[in-house]
Image (tube, rainbow, N blue to C red):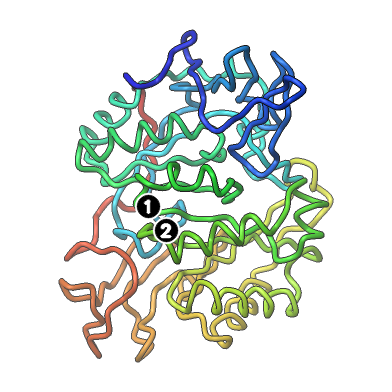
C-alpha cells in the first residue's frame, strides 16, 4: 500500500494508461482501451480519468468477505478441501447478459461497498481464520488490479496462496504484473465463438484465448477453465468439439475444464436452465476428445465432480457437491493404484474445511 499514491479514501493512482494526442486518457488495462475525458469513467465504472491519469476508485472497498471451500471457485486440483477467503468489489469490464453475479458486477454504486479492508488486514484475517488462500472473485479482479496485486503480496507475506477468478479479459501490457503474484486462476471461457462474445458479452474471444495461452506457456500459475453452458447459445456438439480441439492444442489434456449449468438471470430470464443431460453429454464429449479432467458444475452429479486418474481411471478424489469423500492420492500426489502423478497443486493430505461458507467482517 505504501507504494500507492492515495488520492482520497478508496481512490488510488492507477497504472496502465497513457495520454492521447487529443488530451484524453486511454486506459490500457483491458482490451476495451477506453478513451476518457477528465472525470469520465471506463466501461468497468471503477476506473476514472483524472488530471494526472487513471484512478482506481474501489481500492480497499469490498462487497463482503466470505470463507468458501476452494472447490467453489471452482478449483478442483488446487489444494482440495482447503478454505479460501473470497471477496470482490463492484463493476466489471464485460457486459454479460447472463451474469450470475450481476448485482455486484453491474453495480455502479460504489457507495454500496461498505466493507473496507487494507491489503494487510485482508491477509491477516485470512491467516487468523486458518484459510489456505485468498481469492479475488464475484466480480472480475482485473478491474481492481492494483488492489488485487497488493492483497496478493500481503497474502504471500502471511504464507497464503492467491487465486483469481477472472474472464481473462486483460491486455498483454497488464498481464505480467497482474498474474505475477498469483498462484492459481480459474479463467471463465464464456463460449467459443466471437459472435457469442460480441452479442452476449460486449467483448471479444481472441484476447481471452491469448490470456489462456500465455498463462500456460509463460507462467507457473495453476489454471483451470470454466464454461457456463447456455441452452441454444454455446452448448452444441460442434462448438464443444472446436473448444476441445483448441484446448488440447494450446493448454494440453491435463488442465481441468469445468462445464457448469446456466440458470435464468439478469437479462436472460427467458432462457431455460441447462438440463443436467446437456452437461453429462458435453463432459463425455470432452473426455472422448482427450481431456483428462472434465467436471460438471451447478448440478448434483458426484460422478461428474470427482477426479479420476488419467492413466488407469481410478477415482482419486470423490466429491459430492463441495464435500470430499474417498482420497486415493499418496503423499506425493500420485494415484495409489498406478502411481501416475495427478496434475495440480496438492498437500500430502486433503483439507477438511468441507462445504460450508462463513461470512466474516474485517
Residue 351 % position (x, y): 24, 56
Q: Residue at x 36, y 89 (%)?
A: 311
Residue topped by disc 2: 75
Residue at the far front: name it: 21
Which numbered disc, 2 or 1, marks the residue that appears first in the sequence? 1
Secondary structure found at label 1: helix
Q: Check the picture and name the quadrant holding the C terminus.
A: top left
Q: Is residue 56 left or right of residue 243?
A: left
Residue 87 relative to residue 334: left or right: right
Residue 131 vs 14, above or below: the answer is below
State if disc 1 and disc 2 touch (CB < 8 Å): yes
Q: Residue at x 64, y 69 (%)?
A: 276
Name the image quarter holding residue 75.
bottom left
Query: Considering depth in this image, is 127 or 33 the residue closer to the camera?
Result: 33
Residue 13: horizontal and vertical position, in percent? 50, 19
**Left or right of 319 on screen, residue 190:** right
Q: Is residue 159 above or below residue 59?
A: below
Residue under label 1 = 70
Residue placed farthest to the top in the image? 8
Q: Is residue 215 left or right of residue 126?
A: right
Mark 1, other Cα within 10 Å: few <14 / some 14–19 / many ≥20: many
- Residue occupying the point 68% across, 73% down: 278
**Mark 2 packing: few (<14 Cα in 10 Å), some, or many (20+)?**
many
Q: Secondary structure at mark 2?
A: loop
Quadrant of the rendered image containing residue 162: top left
Please tell me which residue lies in front, 79 or 216: 216
Q: Which image quarter: residue 192?
A: bottom right
Q: Decide: is 121 above or below 199.
A: above
Measure the alpha-carbon separation of dots 2 and 1.
Answer: 6 Å
Amino acid at each position: 500500500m505504501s507504494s500507492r499514491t492515495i488520492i482520497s479514501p478508496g481512490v488510488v493512482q492507477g497504472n496502465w494508461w497513457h495520454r492521447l494526442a487529443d488530451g484524453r486518457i486511454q486506459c490500457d488495462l483491458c482490451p476495451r482501451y477506453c478513451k476518457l475525458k477528465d472525470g469520465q469513467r471506463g466501461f468497468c465504472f471503477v476506473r476514472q480519468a483524472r488530471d494526472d491519469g487513471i484512478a482506481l476508485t474501489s481500492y480497499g472497498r469490498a462487497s463482503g468477505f466470505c470463507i468458501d471451500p476452494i472447490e467453489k471457485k471452482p478449483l478442483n486440483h488446487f489444494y482440495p478441501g482447503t478454505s479460501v477467503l473470497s471477496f470482490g468489489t463492484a463493476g466489471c469490464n464485460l457486459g454479460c447478459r447472463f451474469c450470475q453475479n450481476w448485482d455486484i458486477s453491474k453495480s455502479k454504486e460504489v457507495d454500496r461497498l461498505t466493507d473496507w479492508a487494507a491489503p494487510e488486514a485482508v491477509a491477516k484475517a485470512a491467516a487468523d481464520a486458518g484459510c489456505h488462500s485468498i481469492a479475488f472473485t464475484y466480480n472480475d479482479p482485473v478491474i481492481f488490479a492494483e488492489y488485487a496485486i497488493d492483497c496478493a503480496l500481503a497474502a504471500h507475506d502471511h504464507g497464503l496462496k492467491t487465486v483469481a477468478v477472472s474472464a481473462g479479459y486483460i491486455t498483454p501490457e497488464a498481464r505480467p504484473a497482474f498474474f505475477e503474484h498469483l498462484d492459481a486462476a480459474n479463467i471463465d471461457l464464456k463460449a467459443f465463438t466471437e459472435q457469442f462474445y460480441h452479442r452476449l458479452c460486449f467483448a471479444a474471444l481472441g484476447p481471452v484465448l491469448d490470456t489462456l495461452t500465455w498463462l500456460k506457456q509463460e507462467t507457473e500459475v495453476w489454471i483451470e477453465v470454466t464454461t457456463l453452458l447456455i441452452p441454444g447459445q454455446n452448448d452444441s456438439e460442434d462448438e464443444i468439439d472446436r473448444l476441445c480441439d483448441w484446448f488440447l492444442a494450446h493448454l494440453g489434456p491435463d488442465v481441468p475444464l469445468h462445464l457448469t449449468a446456466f440458470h435464468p438471470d439478469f437479462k436472460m430470464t427467458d432462457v431455460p436452465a441447462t438440463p443436467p443431460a446437456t452437461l453429462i453429454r458435453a463432459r463425455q464429449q470432452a473426455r472422448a476428445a482427450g481431456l483428462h479432467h472434465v467436471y460438471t458444475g451447478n448440478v448434483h452429479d458426484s460422478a461428474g465432480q470427482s477426479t479420476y486418474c488419467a492413466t488407469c481411471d481410478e477415482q482419486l478424489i470423490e466429491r459430492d457437491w463441495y464435500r470430499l469423500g474417498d482420497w486415493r492420492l499418496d503423499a506425493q500426489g500420485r494415484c495409489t493404484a498406478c502411481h501416475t502423478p495427478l496434475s495440480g497443486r496438492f498437500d500430502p493430505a486433503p483439507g477438511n474445511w468441507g462445504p460450508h461458507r462463513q461470512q466474516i467482517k474485517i
